[in-house]
Each structure stands twice: as structure tokens, then as C-alpha cells.
Image (cartoon, rainbow, N blue to C red):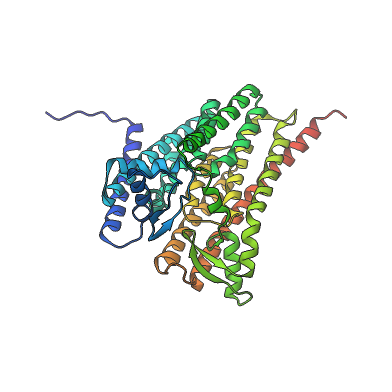
């Protein structure tokens, strides 16, 4: 007598994408286990996790990782997620398996978020879940060999909670994500302005309070344990120009043409460029990023908080502003590591489901997918066939420059779309004004 199992269409969707994730995970584990391929999980995360398991509290002592003594470079709660797999596995191989399982659980949470996004915006569930999965699979080794998927999915969850009008929880999750990786903090002003524009003043106040209290609670926990959880910020403010950043790729191209001189070196866990131009721009990028973000917040606040504007346009504009803010953090920066492309995936999905011209959406999606493919080529050429601190080849420079130019084109296109949308609001308002 056969076993009669009724599987719904929704369950089949989950089984399909989780199954693909599991197969790819097994392949990646086998490659790392059977070869000498460098692994962030094995070479970097495990030493930190093992140190914590042996009584070393974060930020109190340096740790031998990546074949050198390293400081604690991540925000405080990142180390919680590095430690969790070590609770179940004392060996390096076991730790990698446990880490892959943990990231798989976050992948499933992201599947649920994409399904919920499709429901909220009136799109086909399978289509959006498939789109999410394809964009994730194209960056697969960055999912299971980095922890960057975790803050990305937490940010995605915060956005879904905001859509579901669970504002306090949205801010709590966003604050927690910020204690894992700093970038989610840039969305805090946008969500607060969004709620004020919707007339949710009390909700905005509660959300702001929840964000601050959550962040302070995490910091207080570490301070009470005798650690300085903000010491990691100095690590990042002192970093030189990482070779994959947008401005670095432009300088590298000018060096390729013989117009300037650069040297390469490995420090701060990344390959960097040095010289007169890199040294100038490495100190300018953070202030420039802050200025651009402040201007973006001011623009968004001005157009959303004005009276008499069509509130039906609020959500599309907010999705645009969220994406532009994320891209500003990535492109106007000293660092553009490959895993940063993973951070953009929820926002690409947001732009795909909001009302707009199909041709524009398809163009955006093609540019992003090509950007992911070029990121993989960059990873292969500039990291797979090149030693740490060695000069880049002409091919490596051109691949990286092409990827960065395409991302800048997408960034400028979205910015122009936001400006055109807001100019349209102004013209419509003038048309409604009495003679």
C-alpha cells in the first residue's frame, strides 16, 4: 500500500528551491574540503568562533585568523552568528557544515520574505521566489562562505514587517541587523520619514525608540562584559582604498594607460591600492558618502512630507530611495567586495514588483544580473589566479571596471527616475492649483 502524500503548490515551490540550495551547498563543501581553496568560514570565522568557545570574549584579545593576528573587525552581533555553528561542531569541517545549515535557514527566511512581497504587491509567488533564488544562486559562494546573507535577510524581513504595518518590530529587526553589519542603519531615517508621510506619527516615535533601545541594549551587554563593541569602527575608518571599489577601478585603469602610478598590497583583510591618488581618495570617500546620503534623505523628506501630494506614489518612491541609499553605501565607498552584490538583492526585487514600465524593470534586472556575472568573473580572475597583494592583470582591471561602470549606470538611472517622478508630482500639483 503506497504512501499518499498530498503536496501543495506552495510546498513544491519551497522544496524545489531548498533542494537546489542543498545540492549547491554539498558541491561547495566538497570543493573546499577536498582542495586547498581559501575559505572565509574555515580560515577566518572558525578561529574567532573557537576563540569564543575557549573563553575569549569579543574585542578583548586579538585572534590568530587568516594566518595572522587579527582584531575584531565586525559589529558585535556578527560574532553571535559566527559562534552558533561552533556550538554544534568543534572541528573545522563540522563547523563549515553547521555554518552552511545556518545560512540555509536564512535562505528559507528570504524565500518567505519574497513570497510575502509577491502577495503584498499582487505578483505571482513562484515568479518572485524564483527570481529571488536565481539572484541568490548566481552569488552562491558568497552566501555560504560569508555571513553577509544574514544582515541582508534581516533587512529584507524588516522591510516586509514595515509593509505589514508592524512598524515597531520592523525597527527592532533593523536595529538588530545593524549590530550584525552596519549598513542597515542607513534605512532608519527612510523608514521614519515613510511613516511620518503616512500620518503614523506615534508609530514613527515608537519605531525610533525601539531602534535606539535595541541598539543600546546590545552595546550595554558588551560593555558590561568588559568589551568595547564600537572598537571595530576604527578598523574600517582607517582602511585604504580596496582594489574593487569604484574609484579604485578608475585609478587602476588610468595606471594601466600609464597616466599614474599605483602599487598593490594586502592589509585589513583585502587587496588594496596605494599611491598619491589612492591616498587622497581613501580619505574622501566616507565624507562624500555621508553628504550624498544626507542629500538623499533631504530630497525624500521634502517630497514625501509636503501636503497635497498623491500618497499612492509613496511606496514606489520609497523603494527607489531605499535602493539608491544602498547603492550609495556600496558605490561611494572605499570598498566594494563581491559579497556586497548580495546586499542589493531585496532592493532589486522591490523595484521589480512596484508599479512601473516593464521595459525599465527588464533593463534594471539585466544590468544587475550582468553585474553579478561580472562579479564572479572578477572573483575568478582577480582572486583565483592572483596572489594576495600582487598587481592586477589588464584583463582583471577591465572586468572590474566594466562591472563598476554598469553598476554606476544603474545607480544614475534610478536616481534620474526618482527625480523625474518627483518633478512629475510638482507639475501635477501646479495643474491642480486654482488659477
For the point 44% across and 59% down, the residue is: 376
Q: Position of residue 275 (x, y in %)?
A: 60, 70
**Which residue is the extreme one toward the top?**
202
All told, the count of numbered labels is 0
Q: Position of residue 81 (x, y in %)?
A: 39, 41
**Which residue is the extreme one toward the right?**
435
Q: Position of residue 213 (x, y in %)?
A: 55, 29
Q: Is residue 159 above or below residue 25?
A: above
Q: Is residue 402 above or below residue 180?
A: below
For the point 45% across and 35% down, the residue is: 113
Q: Is residue 191 visible?
A: yes
Q: Is residue 53 above or below residue 282?
A: above
Q: Quadrant of residue 162?
A: top right
Q: Quadrant of residue 405?
A: bottom right
Can you say which quadrant of the picture contains the N terminus? top left
**Which residue is the extreme one toward the bottom?**
258
For the point 55% across and 44% down, the residue is: 183
Drawn side of residue 120 relative to residue 190, left or right: left
Drawn side of residue 379 relative to residue 332, left or right: left
Can you say which quadrant of the picture contains the C terminus? top right
Q: Position of residue 290 (x, y in %)?
A: 66, 48
Closest to the observer, 423 or 75: 75
Closest to the observer, 14 or 146: 146
For the point 28% across and 51% down, the residue is: 92
Q: Is residue 309 above or below residue 254?
A: above
Q: Is residue 121 visible?
A: no
**Which residue is the extreme one toward the front?**
226
Amino acid at each position: 500500500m503506497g504512501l499518499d502524500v498530498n503536496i501543495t503548490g506552495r510546498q513544491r515551490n519551497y522544496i524545489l528551491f531548498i533542494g537546489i540550495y542543498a545540492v549547491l551547498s554539498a558541491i561547495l563543501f566538497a570543493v573546499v574540503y577536498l582542495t586547498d581553496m581559501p575559505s572565509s568560514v574555515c580560515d577566518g570565522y572558525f578561529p574567532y568562533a573557537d576563540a569564543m568557545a575557549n573563553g575569549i570574549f569579543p574585542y578583548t584579545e586579538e585572534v590568530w585568523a587568516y594566518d595572522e593576528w587579527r582584531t575584531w573587525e565586525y559589529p558585535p552581533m556578527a560574532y553571535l552568528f559566527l559562534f552558533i555553528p561552533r556550538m554544534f561542531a568543534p572541528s573545522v569541517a563540522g563547523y563549515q557544515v553547521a555554518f552552511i545549515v545556518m545560512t540555509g535557514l536564512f535562505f528559507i527566511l528570504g524565500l518567505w520574505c519574497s513570497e510575502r512581497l509577491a502577495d503584498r504587491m499582487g505578483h505571482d509567488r513562484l515568479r518572485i521566489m524564483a527570481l529571488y533564488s536565481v539572484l541568490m544562486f548566481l552569488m552562491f559562494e558568497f552566501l555560504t562562505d560569508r555571513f553577509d546573507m544574514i544582515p541582508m535577510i534581516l533587512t529584507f524581513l524588516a522591510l516586509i514587517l514595515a509593509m505589514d504595518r508592524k512598524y515597531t518590530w520592523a525597527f527592532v529587526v533593523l536595529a538588530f541587523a545593524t549590530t550584525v553589519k552596519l549598513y542597515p542603519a542607513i534605512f532608519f531615517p527612510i523608514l521614519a520619514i515613510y511613516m511620518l508621510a503616512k500620518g503614523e506619527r506615534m508609530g514613527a516615535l515608537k519605531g525610533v525608540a525601539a531602534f535606539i533601545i535595541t541598539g543600546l541594549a546590545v552595546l550595554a551587554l558588551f560593555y558590561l562584559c568588559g568589551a568595547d563593541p564600537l572598537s571595530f569602527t576604527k578598523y574600517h575608518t582607517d582602511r585604504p582604498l580596496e582594489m574593487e571599489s569604484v574609484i579604485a577601478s578608475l585609478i587602476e585603469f588610468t595606471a594601466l594607460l600609464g597616466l599614474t602610478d599605483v602599487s598593490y598590497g594586502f592589509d585589513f583583510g583585502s587587496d588594496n591600492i596605494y599611491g598619491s591618488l589612492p591616498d587622497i581618495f581613501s580619505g574622501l570617500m566616507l565624507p562624500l558618502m555621508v553628504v550624498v546620503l544626507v542629500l538623499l534623505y533631504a530630497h525624500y523628506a521634502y517630497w514625501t512630507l509636503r501636503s497635497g501630494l498623491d500618497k499612492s506614489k509613496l511606496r514606489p518612491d520609497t523603494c527607489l530611495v531605499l535602493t539608491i541609499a544602498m547603492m550609495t553605501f556600496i558605490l561611494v565607498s572605499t570598498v566594494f567586495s563581491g559579497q556586497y552584490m548580495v546586499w542589493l538583492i531585496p532592493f532589486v526585487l522591490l523595484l521589480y514588483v512596484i508599479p512601473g514600465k516593464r521595459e525599465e524593470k527588464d533593463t534594471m534586472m539585466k544590468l544587475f544580473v550582468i553585474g553579478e556575472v561580472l562579479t564572479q568573473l572578477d572573483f575568478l580572475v582577480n582572486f583565483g589566479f592572483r596572489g594576495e597583494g600582487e598587481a592586477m592583470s589588464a584583463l582583471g582591471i577591465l572586468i572590474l571596471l566594466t562591472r563598476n561602470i554598469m553598476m554606476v549606470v544603474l545607480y544614475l538611472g534610478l536616481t534620474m527616475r526618482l527625480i523625474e517622478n518627483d518633478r512629475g508630482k510638482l507639475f501635477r500639483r501646479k495643474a491642480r492649483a486654482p488659477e
